[in-house]
């Protein structure tokens, strides 16, 4: 009864077209799933050697979805977005086994302004969906310029040395799933992953969206 009432008050809606869906439905309606997901999930290997799985391309409605979640205070989108990411992970790396999920942390001032760490929320929700422990392994040691304001060539230098371990790593870790929201040049997630790789850990990245096709050195 309570469940039906909640579905009536807060119906499950398609992430893109906002059509009302059944309570246990996937986060997209069939039409949007065909349009937005068909061929969108992929695995890329960054110049750093880091493999990264992405669920969507950063364009059109998918781009608007990320902006709503990241910049417009719609933290409630975390759960359906994480389901899309889990689906992409299952499609691209079904046999992969992870000891821990962690995320690329946002800085203190941006966290204060936004009110939540968008990648951290996704990591914790993915932990629930995948049954893999989530731990905060990294912290951001200093404020850097926004990557979106920089050229391709400036991005790597902007995030070099920005991240460090939060403390001593828990024992028994081998393969880490590193979560972020979007890759553009790949510099940010590569910088965070390098901290873990220096500790002898294997790292695979997982992001909601891939914007690498938009990168320009102009």
Image (spheres, rainbow, N blue to C red):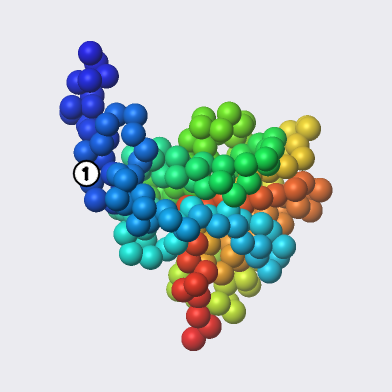
Q: Residue drawn 67% across and 40% down?
A: 95
Question: Which image quadrant for residue 67?
Answer: bottom left
State the residue in front, 204 or 108. Answer: 204
The answer to whether residue 26 of the structure is visible from this angle is yes
In the image, taking residue 33 as reference, residue 195 lies left or right, namely right
Image coordinates for residue 168, horizontal then vertical, percent: 74, 38
Position of the N terminus, as image quadrant, is: top left
Dot 1 alpha-carbon crowd within 10 angstroms: few under 14, some 14 to 19, many 20 or more:
few
Tell me if 120 is positioned left or right of 65 in this view. Answer: right
In percent of the image, x 70 and y 65: which residue is there?
Answer: 48
121 horizontally vs 1: left or right: right
Residue extending farthest to the right is 200
Towards the viewer: 70 or 128:
128
Q: Residue at 21% across / 38% down in the picture?
A: 20
Question: Which residue position holds label 1?
Answer: 19
The answer to whether residue 137 is left or right of residue 81 is right
> Which residue appears at 79% of the width and 53% of the height?
198
Q: Percent from the top left, x then y, of residue 57?
A: 44, 62
Image coordinates of residue 159 in percent, x first then y, are 60, 65
Percent position (x, y) of residue 196? Answer: 72, 50
Give the vertical position of 97 relative to 62 (above or below). Answer: above
């Amino acid at each position: 009864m309570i469940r039906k009432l909640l579905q009536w008050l807060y119906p499950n809606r398609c992430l893109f077209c906002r059509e009302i869906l059944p309570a246990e439905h996937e986060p997209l309606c069939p039409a949007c799933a065909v349009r937005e997901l068909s061929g969108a999930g992929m695995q890329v290997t960054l110049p750093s050697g880091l493999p990264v799985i992405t669920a969507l391309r950063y364009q059109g409605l998918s781009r608007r979805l990320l902006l709503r979640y990241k910049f417009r205070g719609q933290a409630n989108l975390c759960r359906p977005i994480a389901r899309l990411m889990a689906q992409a992970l299952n499609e691209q790396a079904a046999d992969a086994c992870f000891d821990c999920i962690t995320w690329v942390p946002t800085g203190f001032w941006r966290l204060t302004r936004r009110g939540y760490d968008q990648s951290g929320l996704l990591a914790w929700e993915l932990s629930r969906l995948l049954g893999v422990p989530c731990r905060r392994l990294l912290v951001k040691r200093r404020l850097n310029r926004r990557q979106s304001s920089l050229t391709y060539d400036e991005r790597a230098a902007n995030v070099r040395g920005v991240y460090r371990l939060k403390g001593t790593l828990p024992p028994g870790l081998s393969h880490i799933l590193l979560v972020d929201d979007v890759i553009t040049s790949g510099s940010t997630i590569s910088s965070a992953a390098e901290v873990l790789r220096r500790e002898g850990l294997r790292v695979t990245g997982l992001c909601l969206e891939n914007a690498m096709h938009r990168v320009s050195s102009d």
